[in-house]
Amino acid sequence: MRFMATYDFMETMRNTNQWLGASALALGSYPAMAMVPNPAIQWLTAWGQVTERSFARMAAKPDWGIQSVVGEDGRDHIVDIEVEVSKAFGDLIHFKVQGRKEMARKVLLVAPMSGHYATLLRSTVVSLLPDCELYITDWHNARDIPVSEGKFDVEDYTLYLVDFMKYLGPQIHVIAVCQPAPLTLAATAYLAEEDPKAQPRSLTLIGGPIDPDATPTEVTDFGNRITMGQLEQSMIQRVGYKYKGVGRKVYPGLLQLSSFIAMNSESHTKAFKDQINRVAKGEASDHDKHNKFYDEYLAVMDMTGEFYLSTVERIFKGLEIAKNEFVVAGKRVDIGKITDVAVKTVEGENDDISAPGQCVAALRLCTGLPDSKKAWHLEPGAGHYGIFAGKSWRNNIRPLVLDFIDANSGPRVVAGKDTTRPSTAAKAKTKAAG
C-alpha cells in the first residue's frame, strides 16, 4: 500500500498544481481585473496559464500532429495513422500516405521506451515520411495496462520487435533510436537463428547503449553506484486507483520527469520564467518554441517496473548485450550469427547520454558480418537529441542513413530461396495474435 499511496500522492500534487494554475488564470481573466492598474495581475494570469498548461500535459499523450506530406507529384497527400499490429504493451503503427504509391524504402523506426511517448520522434518521422514507407513502435503507458496482461521486461520487448519484423517482412530496414538499440540488435540476432528469412535488410543503431562501459557517462555511473534493491525501493511504485493498471508495479512517468528536470534544473527554471514574462507581455503564442518543446517534454509515461529493473540489471550492470550473453526465452542470443544484415551505427561527438564508443560496439559484436556490411558515423559537435531529431540529423545523418538503406536494398537469397517478398503467413499469424 505504501507504493500505491506514493503514486497517488504524486498524481494528487500534479492535479493540485494544474488546478492552482487554472484558478489563477480564471481569476486574472475576469474583465473586472483589467481595472486594477497593477502588473502583478498580468503576471498572475501568465503564471496560471503556463502552470495549468504544463501540469495538464504531464497526464496526456501527445498527438502526432502529422496531417499531410508533399509527394513527388508536388501535391499534399493526407497521412492516415493506422494500427497494423495491436498488442497489450505496444502497437506497430503505419503512417499511410493516401494517394501515393508504396515507397521502395520500407522502414521500421523503433522508438524508445524511456519515459516519453513515441511522439518524441515526431520530427524524425516528418523527415523520413516523404522518402519512406514508414512504420513505428508505439509503446503504451503502463498505468493503462491491466495487471491481468502480465509482465513486460527486456525479453518481452525483444520478442515484440521480433514479431513486428516478421510481420513487415524481409525487405524492411530498421532504425533504432537510443534505448532500444541493444534490444533491436538482439532481436535481429534472434531472427538470424530462429527465422533467417525474416531478418531485416539493414539495421541502423543511433546513439544506443550497446556497451555502456565503453565510455562511462553520468547515466552509466548512476546504474553502477546503486544496488538493485535500492533502485526498486526508491523508483518502483504501484499504480493507483485512478487508472486501469491499478496495482501494477511501474517506474512512474512523473518520477522520471523529476529526474529529467533535475539534470538541468537551472535551464528549465529560466525557460519557464522567460515564458511567464512573454505571456504577461502578450508576446507568447499557443504554438511558440517553448510550448512546442515542453508539450512533448512534459508528456511522460509509466514504464513497467520489470522492464526498468531488467534494463538496468541486464543491459547496464550485467552488460549482457556487450558480452554477447543475452538470453531470450531461455535461449542465448548469439549476435555473431548475424551474417547478412547490414549494420550501421551513428553517434554524436557531444552525446552525454550514450557517449561515443557505446553504440559502435555493436560492430565488434557482429563477428559473422563482413566489413563490407558494417558502417559507422560520428557526427561532429552533435549531442544526443541532435543525432536523431536536430539539425545534425536533418542535414548530415538522415542523407547518410537513406544512402545506407539504398545500398542494402537488393534481393537477398537465404538457403537458395529468394526472400524479396514479405511473408503473408507471418503477417496473418501476427495479426491473429494481436
Image (cartoon, rainbow, N blue to C red):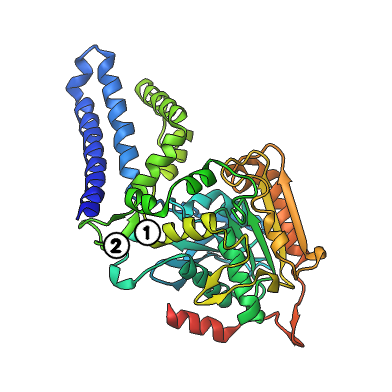
Circle 1 — which element?
A: helix
Residue farthest toward the left in the current orientation of the protein: 32
Q: Which residue is mark 1?
A: 305
Q: Give how far across and how far down residue 366 sits, in percent.
A: 71, 66
Given residues 305 and 258, the one toward you in this image is: 305
Q: Which mark is residue 248?
A: 2
Q: CA distance from mark 2 to mark 1?
A: 8 Å
In the displayed structure, does residue 46 sit left or right of residue 385? left
State yes or no: discs 2 and 1 in contact (Cβ < 8 Å). yes
Q: Is residue 24 visible?
A: yes
Q: Is 276 drawn above or below residue 144 in the view shown?
A: above
In the displayed structure, does residue 40 sit left or right of residue 127? left
Quadrant the N terminus occupies:
bottom left
- Residue placed at 23% from the left, 54% from the top? 4
- Residue placed at 43% from the left, 72% from the top? 86
User: Residue 174 occupies which quadrant of the picture?
Assistant: bottom right
Q: Give how far across and how far down residue 392 sits, in percent.
A: 67, 42
Q: Give how far across and how far down residue 326 sits, in percent.
A: 56, 68
Circle 2 — which element?
A: loop
Kind of residue sitting beneath label 2: Arg
- Mark 1, other Cα within 10 Å: few <14 / some 14–19 / many ≥20: many
Q: Is 379 drawn above or below residue 417 in the view shown?
A: above
Given residues 300 and 364, the one toward you in this image is: 364
Q: Which mark is residue 340?
A: none
In the displayed structure, does residue 301 sit left or right of residue 371? left
Q: Is residue 422 visible?
A: no
Quadrant the C terminus occupies:
bottom left
In the displayed structure, does residue 407 sit left or right of residue 383? right
Q: Is 337 drawn above or below residue 230 in the view shown?
A: below
